[in-house]
Every structure is written in structure tokens, then in C-alpha cells.
Amino acid sequence: MDLSHILNHLGEDREAHRGAVSPPIYQSSIFAFSSVAAFRAGFRDELRSTVYSRGNNPTVEVLRKKVAALEGAEDCLMFSSGAGAIAAAVIASVAAGDHVVCVARPYSWTRALLRDLLGHFGVATSFVDGTDVANFASAITPQTRLIVLESPNSMTYEQQDLAAVAKLAKAHGVRTLCDNSYATPLNQSPLTLGIDMVAHSATKYLNGHSDVVAGALCASEALIREVFKKAYMVCGAVMSPHDAWLMIRGLRTLAVRMERIARTTHEVLTFLQAHAKVEKVHYPHDAANPQFALTAAQMRGASGLLTVVLRAADVAGVERFCNALQRFLMTVSWGGYESLQFPVCAVYPAGAPLMPPGGGAGLNCVRLSVGLEEPEVLIADLSQALDAV
Ligand SMILES: *Cc1c(COP(=O)(O)O)cnc(C)c1O
């Protein structure tokens, strides 16, 4: 992959724009034609021509080319959110009476899409432990049309063997979708492992600056055309030209951001693991992770999202740690330039027990997104906060 060419030049066609080094923002909803013949030709292929910005827009198209190239895909659609990208890919792939197999504990709104929304429309979903490919094999029925993967997921980072699941799916004529937000296209290439469609919450690392909510879907041209016709134009979760421009700008630094974040995260991990108040750390690139061999086999590099499990006597101790952190903003999302914390206990009512009775991540889990700060600054902050547990 000629990474610097993709990030700095691909799709920008500067000669058509008087040499502008930063691409223009085509802030136009519609594009006019000089003849009926030209208008007719525009309608023939709204994925590539410019007729109406719900279909295609020149600024968004620059970004589509870059993200497709990063994923090694023939084409890409950009969305106004990652949830929009995942919903369009799924809706275009199933009909009433069909069955979906999804990895257990996907992103919460992916679960809501499959279990609740599509459940109301006659699409059934089985959620399976994706750490063993045999679980997918036993969940597939004659009605199964789609397998939805998220590897790693974004709280405890379980992975699926993407090549093995892709092979199984192909043998059954089942389509596959993988959410690749955690790894980014730099660190994992599901399409080259045989997966059919790759989705991203571009809100996270791809944009990287906590100023745009965006999504991407990458696949073969045939699949992208199918999604375009069946769901993209219908549901209309499209990206604005201005957001596309911001994301083109955010992408310029993707490689340097990821490199710096991976290095800092390794230092943060080493510090946390040696600390008496830390029970364990969930992180796919930790040699002690039970799936570390799979990490090494299918991922090229590391990200900055990890979950620390505190050795706390009660939720109050966890809250003292979170409230004491100064350099990790307390909020949702992840993947920006700034470090963040997400305390699991914040989604439970006050007074809930440390271990949720229904299973899942304990209330002693705090997810950290490591940003671009100096590692020693983050470690000093974590150190003083751990004293408060
Ligand atoms: C955030 C997220 C999404 C949803 O993306 P939005 O841009 O917030 O709509 C999907 N998958 C994963 C893994 C995420 O973290």
C-alpha cells in the first residue's frame, strides 16, 4: 500500500482545481446539466456521476477513493455515522424470514439494529461467542444470509478468526460484514482475509479529531452498487461535503497518530499491569491476552483502546479513580487526539453492585482511549488516580 500517496494525493485531481493543495468543498446539493442527453447520462450511474448530493458529491468522492484504497476495496460509501454504514450494509443484505449470525457483544447499536429493529421486521439474529469458529458453523441455518463480525470489539476486545469465518461463510453462500473500527485499515485488512464488506465508525481513528460523526463501508464494486441502490439512497444517512473535507484533513495524519498512540499505549499498559490496584488489563496486543496468537496472525499493529479492571472494593472506589483523572476526559467514543475514559459504572444506576448479575463487563472496568499526550503525563495522571481507588 502506497500509504503516503493515498493520504496526501489520491483522488484530489488538483489540475481540475487550479492547483489547490487542499481540495475544494463542493457545498452544493444539486449539479446542473446543459442538455437532456447529459442529464440522462448522469441518471444512469448516480454512484459515480454528480446529480444530487444524497448520491454523490465531489468532495465526498475524494474521501471515498482514499478510504477504499486504505481497505484495498474497489469502492467505498461514506455515511453520516458508523451506525448508518452498518445499518445500510445489513438492510441491503437481508429480507423478512432471513437469519443473521452476529458475534456476541457487538457495538450496542449494532445489537439494537439486529435484535430490536430488524427483529420487528421478521429478521432473526443469533448472537454467538466468536472466539471459536465452530460456534458460527453450528449457528448457520438454511435461512442465514449474513454474518456480522466485530474484531476486536470495543470493550473487551474479543476477536474472530476472520479468514476461517470467511471460508465457512463462502462454503454456505453467506455474506460477511466486519466492523474494523478498532484496528483501522492500517492494522487489519478483513477484505484480504476473504470478508465481503468492511464497516467503520470513521468518527474514531479515521477522522481522529473528535469533530465529525462519520461512517464508511468498503466492498467490491458490485456489493457497493447493491448497497447504494437498496439502502444508501433510500435511508439517506449521507455525509456532508464539509464533514468530508474535515475527514480528508484528519486522515492526513492517520499513520503518525496511530504510530504514536501505539507506542504510548504500550508504555501505559506496562505501567498499569505492574500496579497493585489493577486486577487486569484487556488489550489484544498484550502477550497475556488469551487470543494473542490470533492478534499476531491477523493484525499488523496496535491501537490505543484498552480496558483496565480495577482491584476496587466497591463502585465508590472506581468512581474516586475516575473523578481523580485529570488528563482523560470522561465521555463516550474514542480514537481522537485526546485521551478519554469511559467508566462502565456510569451506565448503571448509582448503588448497583460491582458485578452485574446478568454478566458482561464489571463495574470495575474503565475503558481508556490513549491520545497524543506525552506518555509520562498520562502515566503520572493514572498513578495519582490509582492512589484514590
Ligand atoms: C462508535 C462505534 C460504532 C458506531 O459509529 P458512530 O460513528 O458512532 O455511528 C460502530 N462500531 C464500533 C465498534 C464503534 O465503536
Image (cartoon, rainbow, N blue to C red):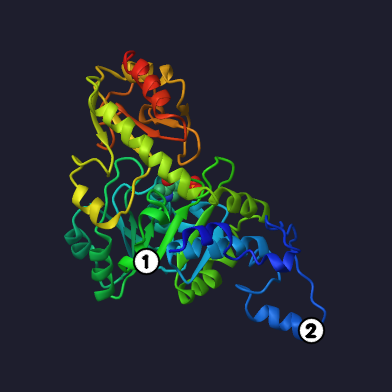
Q: Residues within 10 Å of mark 1 (few under 14, many from 20)?
A: many
Q: Quadrant of the N terminus?
A: bottom left
Q: Do the numbered discs 2 and 1 sit on residues whose CB atoms are within 8 Å?
A: no
| Quarter holding residue 18 | bottom right
| Quarter holding residue 154 | top left
Q: Amino acid at mark 2?
A: Val
Read off the residue under disc 1: 191
Q: Disc 2 to disc 1, how far (Cα)?
A: 40 Å
Q: Quadrant of the C terminus?
A: top left
The x and y percentages for residue 157 are: 30, 44
Count of marks overlaid on the render? 2
In the image, residue 47 above or below residue 80: below
Q: Residue furthest bottom?
A: 37
Q: Looking at the image, which residue is at 38% across and 35% down?
A: 264
Q: Amino acid at mark 1?
A: Leu
Whether residue 340 is visible:
yes
Q: Going by the image, does 14 lie left or right of 145?
A: right
Q: Going by the image, does 290 lie left or right of 308?
A: left
Q: Looking at the image, which residue is at 26% across and 19% down?
A: 312
Whether residue 91 is visible:
no
Residue 137's disc is none
Q: Going by the image, does 379 lie left or right of 362?
A: right
* Element class at badge 1: helix
Q: Indicate which label's residue lies in the foreground, 2 or 1.
A: 1
The x and y percentages for residue 316 are: 34, 16
Read off the residue under disc 2: 36
In the image, residue 160 above or below residue 261: below
Q: Residues within 10 Å of mark 2 (few under 14, many from 20)?
A: few
Q: Going from the N terminus, do you reach mark 2 or mark 1 first?
A: 2
* Element class at badge 2: helix
Q: Looking at the image, which residue is at 27% across and 57% down?
A: 298
The x and y percentages for residue 183 are: 37, 51
